[in-house]
Image (cartoon, helix red, strand yellow):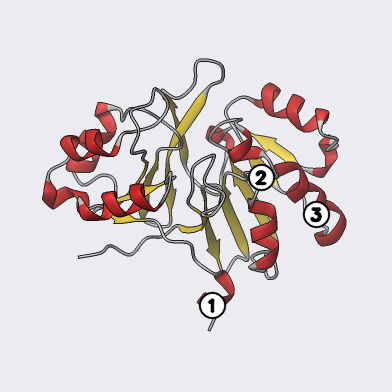
Amino acid sequence: MKYSNTLKFIGNGSCFNTTFGNNSAYYIDEEKQSLLLIDCGESIFERIKKQKILEKVKDIYILITHMHTDHVGSLSSLLFFCEYRKGIIPTVIYPEKSTMSQFLSLVGNEPQAYKLITPSECEEYRIHEINQEHSGFINAYGYVLRIGDRCIYYSGDTKTIPQSIIESFRNGKIDEFYQDVSRYDTPAHMNIETLSRLFHKDERNKITCMHFDDDITKNKAECLGFNISRISEYRNLER
């Protein structure tokens, strides 16, 4: 049985997988005309424009997991587009305000063109950040957030899964589980074989894998029984 996911994906590739595009998920509340975007890597702004995701959107929330460029590389362009073409002031959500503010200042985004808040300050979505094991040079975060009545765990980039998340998942407190995976044994990402050892076969189809190195990684995850993130064309969803 495949589970229906609240989040759709603009891209689902790892840093070097230019075919799949940078890993980025989103949710649109049609009634509120509101967009939640998770990460905005180098390829994402172009894909957002091509898919016309912003056409009927009035409020934009951008949740960032960490500062690697495959996750923030086109954030500046998106903010400029919202300012000059849409007349929208997006809300950028990140635990480290000073880090994000400095980054956006360096690339030329003026502070009045966006609102910067921490996850705990977000009123639209209840968001709790989790410190993840990804890089020794920058901090990386996963998130537990609520969209409607759904509790969602979004790993971001990480080598491990907190035991508290696994327990919450098994106790039915997490409705949707999104996990980054790799077929390589790296200090930065969850190895797909390790993930399969953490979860029983009857649990795996409730976990959606993302951030694929290549088709081999994606196919291996699917063969092991995990759900797979799939790139969604937003304009096709309206038909």
In terms of sequence position, does the residue under pointer 3 or pointer 1 come before the other? 3
Mark 2 neighbour class, 10 Å CA radius: few under 14, some 14 to 19, many 20 or more: many
> SS for tag 3?
helix
Query: Residue at (36%, 40%) from the top-left corner?
Result: 181
Which kind of residue does numbered mark 2 sit on? Answer: Glu
The answer to whether residue 188 is left or right of residue 52 is left
Number of the label disc, if any, that sits on residue 236:
1
- Counting residues from the N terminus, which is met first, the one under dot 2 or under dot 3? 2
Is residue 26 positioned above or below 65 on the image? below
Contact flag, marks 2 and 1 (Cβ < 8 Å): no
Q: Earlier in the sequence, mark 2 or mark 1?
A: 2
Percent position (x, y) of residue 10? 54, 58
- Pointers 3 and 1 in contact (C-beta within 8 Å): no
Amino acid on which the number 3 mark rests in the picture: Phe
Name the element at disc 1. helix
Measure the C-alpha gap from mark 2 to mark 3: 15 Å
The residue under label 2 is 42
Q: Quadrant of residue 159?
A: top left
Seen at 42% across and 48% down, the residue is: 214
Front of the two marks 2 and 3: 2
- Farthest residue in the top direction? 136
Residue 182 place in picture, x, y as percent: 36, 38
- Disc number placed over residue 81 in the picture, else none: 3
Left or right: residue 34 versus residue 203 is right
Q: Is residue 126 left or right of residue 4?
A: right
Residue appearing at x 56%, y 16% in the figure: 137
Residue 234 position within the rendered picture, expressed as x and y whole percent measured from the top left:
56, 70
Label 2's element?
loop
Disc 2, disc 3: CB below 8 Å? Answer: no
